[in-house]
Structure formats: structure tokens, C-alpha cells
Amino acid sequence: MTATSFPDTAAAPALSRATTILMAVAAGVLAANLYYAQPVVALIGADLGMSVAAESTIVTASQIGYALGLVLLVPLGDVLENRRLILATMSAAAIGLVGLAFAPNIAVLYAMTLAVGIASAAAQMIVPLAASFAPPERRGKVVGEVMTGLLGGILIARPLSSFLAGLMGWRAIFAVSAVAVAGLTLAGLRLFPTRRPVHRARYGELIASLGRLFVTQPVLRRRALYHAAMFAAFGIFWTGAPIVLLREPFSLSPQWVALFTLGGVLGVFAAPVAGRLADGGHSRAGTLAAIALAASAMALAFAGARSFTALLIAGILLDLGVQANLVIGQREIFQLDDTIRNRLNAVYMTTFFLGGALGSSLTSPVLERFGWHGVAAMAFAFPAAALLYFLAAEGRR
């Protein structure tokens, strides 16, 4: 495929259906790497001799790695040929997954988890590339389709991890992912379109511009902070709930925990609907509904200390709200300036993944000290704060 330059989306040819599907699947498989550990942190910790209070830091390490990848690698999509950058980063992810599958001790586990998190940021290079080949009036739809794959990967990661851990041990999921990422890299070599940006900047200038974008772009700043709060609740719930279900009074097996986490897959259906709502000019209403839904879900989660049904419904509603808000936010920031789309996405994703990392890191110690009710209260506080911020910033517009 011949390298070409598309400084504006109007000049770019539309993506083929096969390429769109490949982008969606690749983004999903890459993003899933951040969540395989969530339902099995107790198994990993027991195998490698970790303390219970430290188990959730495995998830935190992957999210910190992802945030580093967003800051250090994703902005390169504004100055380097996109296809080559994505494929190189995906190759690094496959290598890191092999190392993670064979990690002999805690130190190697953390190092490989961090490395896989960094390289999995290739998922957020794919989304802007897809947006660059979509006309403005259909950008929400195209982003929604690719994000459906990405979010599907996130949501399927937890049940898949639990099932494989129960059958073959926790290492199997990372080996399987390594094979999947390698295969998708080969497919991308054939089908991913080339895009050579016209913008030129030194690497230091590129990274330094991220902070300025956060300060000077109010839409970006608001959307990033809304979703940081939403993703903190997401990280808290999906790190804490599987731990609770493995303990008394539930005492479920990893396979039953997998069935529980499978309920969250329903959240993937929010992505295309949210994209169409945003295209139709309903971003504000959609954002309000998404944040309110997440807050309501975490209020319901209070009953989850002894109710499996309450936990399941809360998880489904939370995922619907989080995924809808994510797609609406991305569609809004992609409308700002197509020449800096990768950096806009980097700032957006980094901000909210730091929120997720904060939530995940707090989950185990809060659970140990205050029990599930403390975890649910903490998870509720984040989207409630986002709702207040939204009403203050945009409620009267």
C-alpha cells in the first residue's frame, strides 16, 4: 500500500468494511490486555506470594503503563506515518505478553505488565486513524464502530480471563493474547491504510504540547475530567467485585466469577448508539444520562455485599454509562482539530486512565479496611462529582 498524506478528512478515502472490522478487533484485543488481570489478581497474588492489600496494584501497573504509552507514543501519530507506528507498537505488545506469560517472580510481572500496558496504547492510535478516514457527518458512527470493538475487548477480557484461569491457570490468557496480537499485526500489515501527517515537530515539543492542550482546550479538559471520574468508578467496581465474589458469603469459583463479568459485555451496545446520538447533536443530553446512570449503578452496588443480583445489575448499568460517555467524549474532541487528533486523544485517554489507575489502586486497601460498603461509597463518589461538575460547566447551555 502506497503511503499518502491526508491533512484533512475530506481528502481521505473511506475505509473498507474489512479494514474497519480489523481496526475494531485489533483495538479490542489490545485494550483487553489491561483487564485480563482484574478478575484473577487473587490467583496471581497467591501464586507469586503477594499480600492481599497489594493485589490490585497489578491492575494499576497496567493502567499506568497505558497512560505512559498514551503520553509518550500516541502523540507520534501526529508526525509519523501511522500504519508503521501502529504495527511496530503492536509487535512490542506481543513480545511483552510472552514475557508476562512466563514471568517467574513479582518484579518481572510488574515490569512486563508495565511494558504491555505501554505498547497496548496502539489501540488509541487506531481510533484516530479511523476518524481521519471518516467524513465529519459520520465521524461519530465510525468512531462508535471501532470503539465497539475496543470496548468489546475490554468487556470480554474479564470473563475470558476467569474462564482460562480456571481451566489452565492465569498465565494462559497472556499467552493466548500474545498469539492474537501477533496475528492481527500480520493482518494489519496488509489492510491498515497509510497516513503520513504533514505536521512536523521535535519529539520534546510534541510531548510538551500535551499540557498546553489540556489548559487551552476547554472541551477537551471537561470531557477528560468527566471520564476520569467515570473510569475511576469502573476500576473500583471491576477490581473489587471479583475479589468479593471469591470470598464469603459468595465463595464463587473463577468460572462463576467469569459468568458474572460476562454481564458487563452488554455495555458494548452503548457505543454505536452513543456515537449516533452525538452525530445527531445530542452530546449534552447523552453525557448527562451516561454520568447519571453510572452514579445510579454505584448507588445500587451498596446492596451488593450480600446480593449477587444487585452486583450484576450495577455492573451492567455502570458499563453502559461508562462506554456511552467515552464514545461521546471522543467524538467531541475529534471535532476540535484534525491535525492534532492523536494528541487530543492522548490527553483525553491519559487523563481518564489515571482516574482508573487511582480507583484500582485504592480498591484493595479500602476493601480490607471498610468492606464492600466502603468500596461502593467510593465508587459512587466519583460519578457523583462528575455530575456536579457537568451541571456547573454545561448545565445552563
Image: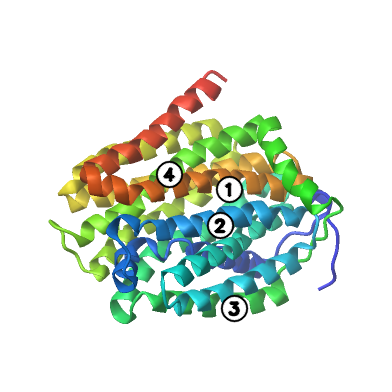
On screen, residue 8 above or below 109: above
Separation of residues labelled 2 and 3 (CA atoms): 19 Å
- Give the amino acid type for the residue marked by disc 2 in the picture: Tyr
Of the numbered discs 1 and 2, the one sitting upstream in the chain is 2
* In this picture, residue 98 sits left or right of residue 121: left
Badge 1: residue crowd in 10 Å (few <14, some 14–19, many ≥20)? many
Q: Which mark is residue 182?
A: 3
Give the position of the N terminus as an image quadrant: bottom right
Residue shown at 70%/51% (left/top)? 342
User: Which residue lies under the disc numbered 4?
Assistant: 232
Which residue is disc 2 drawn over? 66
Q: Picture quarter containing residue 126?
A: bottom right
Reading the image, the residue beneath label 1 is 349
Q: Position of residue 217 (x, y in %)?
A: 68, 33
Quadrant location, the C terminus: top right
Question: Which tag, 2 or 3, sits closer to the chain's start?
Answer: 2
Q: Residue at x 43, y 61 (%)?
A: 35
Query: What separation in Å lies between label 4 and label 1 (alpha carbons)?
Result: 13 Å
Q: What is the spatial separation of the Cα atoms under label 1 and label 2, in whole angstroms?
A: 9 Å
To which quarter of the image does residue 30 belong?
bottom right
